[in-house]
Image: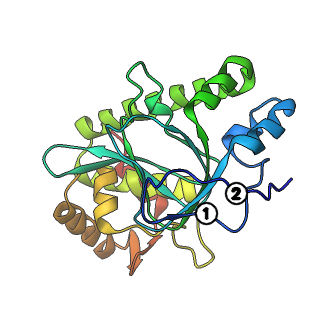
Amino acid sequence: MLHKQYLYLPALNLQMSAPKNSCDLSLCFLCSNSLPGWQALISANRKNLRFKKGATLFEEGEPVSGMHFVYSGIVKVHRQWGNQKQLILRFAKAGDILGYRGLSNEKKYTVSATAIEPVTVCYVELSFFESMLQINHPLTYQLMQCYANELQYAEKKMSNLVHMNVRARVAETLLALLSQFGKSRDGSIDIQLSRQDIAAFTGTTYETLFRTMQEFIQGKLIRVSGKKIFLLKEKKLAELTLIP
C-alpha cells in the first residue's frame, strides 16, 4: 500500500528532501515486524525523507529525535575514534533500522549516520516508536535481537583489533563487505567505498590500508578498478583471517 501524503521534518540537514515515492510498508524493519493493526498508524505517522550522498542523518551526541528505517541506499554508522579519526561500526542498507543506540536514559545518539550514496528513509518520532515498543511484542523482540547481534559483532570487532594483524583485518573487512552486499554483475563487491572509508571500517590508517591492498593486488588475491574491488581468491583471504 502506498501512502500519497508526504510529511516533513524540521530542517535537520540542508541536503535533505522529500522523495517522490513513498516507501513500501512491507519492506522496512518497523512495518514488517509490527502487528497488522498498526499499519495505518505507521502510515499516518511516518515521514519520508531523502538524503543526498554525504548528508548526515544524525550526529553523535545529538538528542534522539526519532528512528530512521532505510528504504534504499547505504548509510555508514560511525563514531569518533581518537583525534580527528573515524571508526565505521557498520553499514546499513534497505530494511535496516538506524538510531536505536540512542534508546537509553540519556536519549542521545551514541553514533553518527552518514549517507554514502543517495538514501531514502522512513522516519518516525521517538514518542511514537516507544509507544509501539510497549504494545508490539514482535517489534520489541526483533529490536532486542538487533542489540544482541550488534553486541556480538562489536565484541568480535574489538577482538580482531587486538589479535589480528593488519593484513588479516583487511581480509576480514573485504570478506565482510562481500557477505553483506554480495557481488554485482561484473563480479565486484556490490558496494563502492572510498579507501578512507574502508580504512575506517578496518580500524587502520589510509596509508596502511593502501600498502596492504597493494600487497593483495600483487599477490593476485584481489583486483581493483577505481572503487570496484574483485576478490580473486576468497579462500586464501579467509585463511589470512584465522587467528593462531
Image-quadrant location for residue 53? bottom left
The answer to whether residue 94 is visible is: no
Q: Residue at x 56, y 32 (%)?
A: 126
How far across and down, in percent of the image, does residue 142 sit? 66, 28
Look at mark 1 in the image and give the residue it sits on.
Answer: 18
First in sequence: mark 1 or mark 2?
2
How many other residues sit within 10 Å of disc 2, few (<14), some (14-19) or many (≥20)?
A: some
Image-quadrant location for residue 54? bottom left
**Of the pair 139 and 170, the residue shown nearer to us:** 139
Is residue 144 shown left or right of residue 209?
right
Q: Is residue 20 above or below residue 115?
A: below
**Of the pair 191 and 46, the residue shown nearer to us:** 46
Q: Is residue 236 above or below residue 65?
A: below
SS at mark 1?
loop
Image-quadrant location for residue 97? top right
Colour convention: rainbow
- CB within 8 Å, label 1 to label 2: yes
Q: Is residue 40 above or below residue 219?
A: above
- Check the image and name the residue furthest to the left: 83
| Residue type for callout 1 | Ala
Q: Is residue 71 above or below residue 196?
A: above
Q: Which mark is residue 26?
A: none
**Of the pair 196 and 213, the residue shown nearer to us:** 196
Look at mark 2 in the image and give the residue it sits on.
Answer: 6
The answer to whether residue 70 is visible is: yes
Q: Residue at x 56, y 59 (%)?
A: 181
